[in-house]
Amino acid sequence: MSSHNVSLELERGVGIGLRRICEWVEYSDFTDGGTTAGTLDLTETIPAGSFVLGSKVTVKTGFTGGTNTTAVLDIGDGSDDDLFSYTTHNIYTAASNLVEGCDSAAAGNTGTGIVPLSAETTLTLTATVSADWTTIEAGKALIEVFYFSTNPEVVDHDDNPFAG
C-alpha cells in the first residue's frame, strides 16, 4: 500500500488531516505595489472546509537592497493582509523557524487562533520594506501555511521542498 493510500485511509477513519502549503518565493516574484510593499499570490490554495493554524517562514536570503533597513512579511487572503500571520515575519535577514499563529480576530475571536475557511482560499503575501519596493535586490524564503482539512485531499507534492 502506498503512503498516499495510508494517508487517505487515516483521513477517512479520523475525518481530518493536517496539511501544509509550501512554496519557495524570491524577491523578483513579488509585484510592486507602487510604494514600500510588494505582493504575491501563492500557486497552491487552501481548500474549503479547512481550519488554518498558522504560518512558518524560513528566510534563506534576506530581502535587502537600496536604503532599506527593514523587511517584514504578512500572510493573508487578499482582503486581510495578516489573516494567517498574527504579526509580521521579519524577512530582512536569514532566519529559520519564524512561526506565527493566525489572526483569529478576523474570525470573530481575539488574538491568535484557528481560522475556519468555508471557501477555497488563495494565500497572498505582502512584503513591506522601509524604502521603496523597487530597490529590493535580493531575497528568498520558504513559506509554509499549516491547516487541518476536513476533506480527504491526498495529492502529490514536491518530496523535498527544502531543496530550493
Image (tube, rainbow, N blue to C red):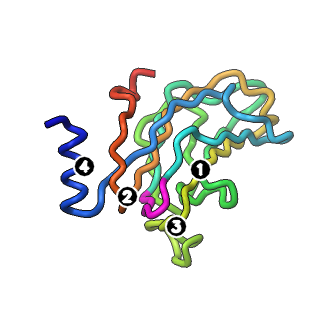
Q: Which callout, 4 or 3, points to the residue nearer the camera?
A: 4
* Position above or below: 71 against 61: below
Q: Of residues 10 and 65, which is closer to you in this image?
A: 10
x 63%, y 44%: residue: 125
Mark toward the start of the polypeptide (1 vs 2): 1
Identity of the amino acid at label 2?
Answer: Ser
Element at label 2: strand
Whether the magenta-drawn stretch holds residue 50 is answered as yes
Give the magenta range: 47-53
Q: Say what secondary structure mark 1 lies in.
A: strand
Give 151 or 54, whichever is nearer the viewer.
151
Dot 4 crowding, Cα within 10 Å, few <14, some 14–19, many 20+: some
Dot 3 crowding, Cα within 10 Å, few <14, some 14–19, many 20+? few
Residue 57 image label: none
User: CA gap, disc 4 to disc 3?
Assistant: 22 Å
For label 3, the SS is loop
Q: Are marks 3 and 1 in contact (CB under 8 Å)?
A: no
114 w.r.t. 63: above or below: below
Where residue 130 sits, quadrant-wise, is top right
Give the percent coordinates (x, y) of residue 95: 47, 34
- The residue beneath circle 1 is 122
Label 3 vs label 2: CA separation? Answer: 11 Å
Up-down relation of residue 84 to residue 144 (above or below): below
**Residue plotted at (18% across, 61% down):** 13
Please, what is the three-letter code of the amino acid marked with disc 4?
Leu
Quadrant housing the N terminus:
top left
Q: CA distance from mark 1 to mark 2?
A: 15 Å
The residue beneath circle 4 is 8
> What distance separates the C-alpha of mark 3 from that of mark 1?
13 Å
Q: Sequence-wise, which precedes: disc 3 or disc 2?
A: 3
Residue matched to label 2: 149
